[in-house]
Structure formats: C-alpha cells, structure tokens
Image (cartoon, grey):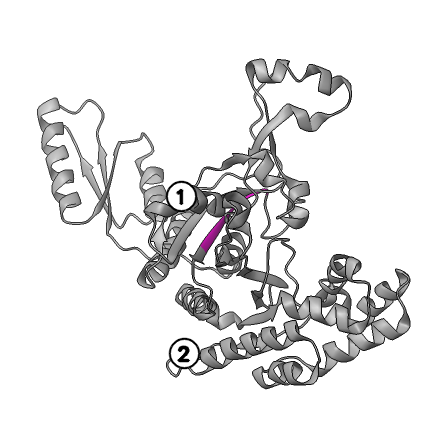
C-alpha cells in the first residue's frame, strides 16, 4: 500500500514562505512579552490523562487526542477493553491548551521560580475539533501568565502586554477590541434572576451563544428549557441595563444586592479605568456581561479580544485561582492571556502581510565538477558573506540555469553569483 502524501485531517504542512512569516510574527510577540519581564518556559505536549480529564477544560475535554498505553500496560487492559471501557487503554494525551500544563509545571517547580512568576509559553496544542478557517487540530498558542499575584495589577499588565503585541503585529488597522467580564458577575446574575443555582453552568452555556444567536435567541432558548418567564425577563433586564462602560459596571455593583457582583463590578471597573488612563496608547476596552469563556477553571476576571471582520475572538484568558491547588492542595492566584496565533496569522497572511527581509539573500550557483581547491575558495567567500550578516544559499548549477535563477529570485535572492571551472 503506498504512503499517503496528504497530512492527517486538521493538520497541515507549512511551506518556507509561510514559515518565514510565522517566525517573524512570533518573534514580535516574544520581543514584546519579554520587554514586560515575562520569562520563556516550556512544557511537554504530552500530559497525564488524569490531568486532562479533570473537568477543568470544559468542552475541550471532549476533543482530547488520547495516547494508548504501551507494552505490558496495554496488554493488562484487555479485560477492560472486552467490557467496553476504552478509557482504560490510555494513560496520557496531547495537551489541549497551555494553561493546565503550566499549572502542573508551577506546582512541580515553584521552589525554583520567582514570585510572582511571569511565564511566557509558545507552543502547539491539539484538539480533535472540526477544522475551519483559522482553526486546525494542531495549532499554536502564545500565552502569558502571572502566578502568585492576587491583585488585579496582574490583569492590567496582561491586557497592556497583549494589546501592545497586537499593535506591533499590525492588528490595530482591523479595529480589535478588548471585552471584559468577571465570572462572579455571571454567577451573581443567575442567582439574582431567580434561576436554580445548580443550573448555573447550563444557563451560562446558553448565554455564551449571545454573539451568535442574539438576545432574542438567548431568551427563547432559556424558555424552551423550561425556565420561568420572570427569571428570563429579570436576567434580560440586567444584561440590557449594564454594559460597555466602566461607569455602567460600577453602577451594577451599586444597584444589585449581591456581594459577589459588588466585588466583581468594582474589580472590572478599576481595571477598565486604569487601562483608559494610559495616555500614550488608546486601548478600546468594553464591559460585556454576556462574556462567559468556556473553560471550567476560570474563577474571576475573564477577557477576550475580538476583531469584528474575523467574526470571532483572537485572544482570550482569565483568572484561575484554584487550578494549582488541585496539584498541591494549596491555592495559588493565577491569571493568563492567550493569543490564538493561527487566527492572527490567517488575518495577516490573507491581507498580504510578508516577513521583512532583514538580511540580504545571496545565491552561489556552482558549475558541477568544480575543482576541490577552487570549491574551497568559494566556501571561504560564502563564509565572509555570512560573517557580514548576509544569508548565502549554495547549489550546483542546473541545466536550465535561467529557470533556476528565476526560482531563486522569486524567493528573494537579489544577488545571484555564478562560479565556473574556468
């Protein structure tokens, strides 16, 4: 049977020109984040299956690429397989995001890490999702997280760093906007509206669809689930009364008799006020009471960055103060912001963005059968050019030299030199 040339569904090959742009864009993100004091670190792409299925990742836990046990461990699972327990065949899986592995990393290494720890992690994650524009089964995330700071200074710095990275990438021309909310506001609204507390997560799943089905669609779906009209109307009144500005969310904390909402509203308003006070940069930030974020691990502030022309978020994150405690037994405050690199790359590449040529590209094409001594001299010339900061490509001269030179020129080689035996 012949080998299959195409990549596995949802995966893709990356050609040199595209790779050049990817490396350039990731270099910008890395430079900006490093300037804020974030330290580069790395975790394995393979994670313990117990960690991945700990009910922290929301719907992403349904999309895990599982890895089968090996050798004797797999053989010992035959009885489980006969009983239909396929989960018993796996002991690990590919990570679906960078946050859960970071929490394990911190729990394992915290004695060696600065406090607070400002982590920068860029790498591949995997989800068995349906591929679509800007979404693949293997994709790159660019994360910054602050672990060990319980104050909202952490949120403020994450928003400043991420929006600066987006600006440096050239995303400002597409009109990106930061949306912010707090999980405590969401839980408080559901309680104040009179819904059963045990149904909160189901209600939030519906609310999370607001940007797709609209306010009427949210209300209709909640009514179709059997909830009382009075509860739906109260929730709708809150959602419509408090949105967009820091003044609005602050007023929500004053008007609604719920301690969690009061604390969260002041927190969100303070973050928005601090960001708005930046004189050197204008950051468009908006309170959105329908912002939910799907991950089960969020405990407080949540945020997203949306580009209207793209139709979905390009960045997202929030506070997850209890996750590290799942590993150590003691909670550590933590908050992170993630850039969905593939979506950013899709927007920029479709708009014709190219990586700048930082070094002159020189090509040496050499006649076949070149005398070894003369070839050594050519190697010396190439070494001198590289020492001068130039990129030098070397190849034997093709029969169709004209076609070869045209191909090199199309790849950005502006200086093509020919070497002959004469």
Q: How many marks?
A: 2
First reached walking from the N terminus: tag 1 or tag 2: 1
Let me know if residue 270 is in the magenta part.
Answer: no
Let me know if residue 138 is in the magenta part.
Answer: yes
Q: Is residue 19 visible?
A: yes
184 over 270 or under it: above or below: above
Left or right relative to 367: residue 117: right
Q: Magenta part mainly helix, strand or loop?
A: strand
Q: Mark on residue 281? A: 2
Spot occupied by residue 192 in the image (x, y as percentages of width and height) = 76, 73
Magenta extent: 137-143
Badge 1 crowding class, 10 Å Cα cut-off, few under 14, some 14 to 19, many 20 or more, is some
Left or right relative to 130: residue 386: left
Residue 312 lies in quadrant: bottom right
Residue at horizontal 48 percent and vertical 55 percent from the top: 332
Residue at horizontal 69 percent and vertical 15 percent from the top: 78
Q: Mark on residue 42? A: 1
Q: Is residue 18 visible?
A: no
Residue 27 lies in quadrant: bottom left
Residue at horizontal 40 percent and vertical 78 percent from the top: 281
- 362 and 213: which is toward the camera: 213
Which part of the image, by quadrant, shows the C terminus?
A: top left
Look at discs 1 and 2 and give the one toward the viewer: 1
Distance, label 1 to label 2, CA atoms, is: 31 Å
119 over 125 or under it: above or below: below
Spot occupied by residue 104 in the image (x, y as percentages of width and height) = 48, 43
Badge 2 crowding class, 10 Å Cα cut-off, few under 14, some 14 to 19, many 20 or more, is few
- 323 and 395: which is toward the camera: 323
Spot occupied by residue 284 in the image (x, y as percentages of width and height) = 52, 77
Q: In the structure shown, which secondary structural element does the residue marked by tag 1 occupy?
A: loop
């Amino acid at each position: 049977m012949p080998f299959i040339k195409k990549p596995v569904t949802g995966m893709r090959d990356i050609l040199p020109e595209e790779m050049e742009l990817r490396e350039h864009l990731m270099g910008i993100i890395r430079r900006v984040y490093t300037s804020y004091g974030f330290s580069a670190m790395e975790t394995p792409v393979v994670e313990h299956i117990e960690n991945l299925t700990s009910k922290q990742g929301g719907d992403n836990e349904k999309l895990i690429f599982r890895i089968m046990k090996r050798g004797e461990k797999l053989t010992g699972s035959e009885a489980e397989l006969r009983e239909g327990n396929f989960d018993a065949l796996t002991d690990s899986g590919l990570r679906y995001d960078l946050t859960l592995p970071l929490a394990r990393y911190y729990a394992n290494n915290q004695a060696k890490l600065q406090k607070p720890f400002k982590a920068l992690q860029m790498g591949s994650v995997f989800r068995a999702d349906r591929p679509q524009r800007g979404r693949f089964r293997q994709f790159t995330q660019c994360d910054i997280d602050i672990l060990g700071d319980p104050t909202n200074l952490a949120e403020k710095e994450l928003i400043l760093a991420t929006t600066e990275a987006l600006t440096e990438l050239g995303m400002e021309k597409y009109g990106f906007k930061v949306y912010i909310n707090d999980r405590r506001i969401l839980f408080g609204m559901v309680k104040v509206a009179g819904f059963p507390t045990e149904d909160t997560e189901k209600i939030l799943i519906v609310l999370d669809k607001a940007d797709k089905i609209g306010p009427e669609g949210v209300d209709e779906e909640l009514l179709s689930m059997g909830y009382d009209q009075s509860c739906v109307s109260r929730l709708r009144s809150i959602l419509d009364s408090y949105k967009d500005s820091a003044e609005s969310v602050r007023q929500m904390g004053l008007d609604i008799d719920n301690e969690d909402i009061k604390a969260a509203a002041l927190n969100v308003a303070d973050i928005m006020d601090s960001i708005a006070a930046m004189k050197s940069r204008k950051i468009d930030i908006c309170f959105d009471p329908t912002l939910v974020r799907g991950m089960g691990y969020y405990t407080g502030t949540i945020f997203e960055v949306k580009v209207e022309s793209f139709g979905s978020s390009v960045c997202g994150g929030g506070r997850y103060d209890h996750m590290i405690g799942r590993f150590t037994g003691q909670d550590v405050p933590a908050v992170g912001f993630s850039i969905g690199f593939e979506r950013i790359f899709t927007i920029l590449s479709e708009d014709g963005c190219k990586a700048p040529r930082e070094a002159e590209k020189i090509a040496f094409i050499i006649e076949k059968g070149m005398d070894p001594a003369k070839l050594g001299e050519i190697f010396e010339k190439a070494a001198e050019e590289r020492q001068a900061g130039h990129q030098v490509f070397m190849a034997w001269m093709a029969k169709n030299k004209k076609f070869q030179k045209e191909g090199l020129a199309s790849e950005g080689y502006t200086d093509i030199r020919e070497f002959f035996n004469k």
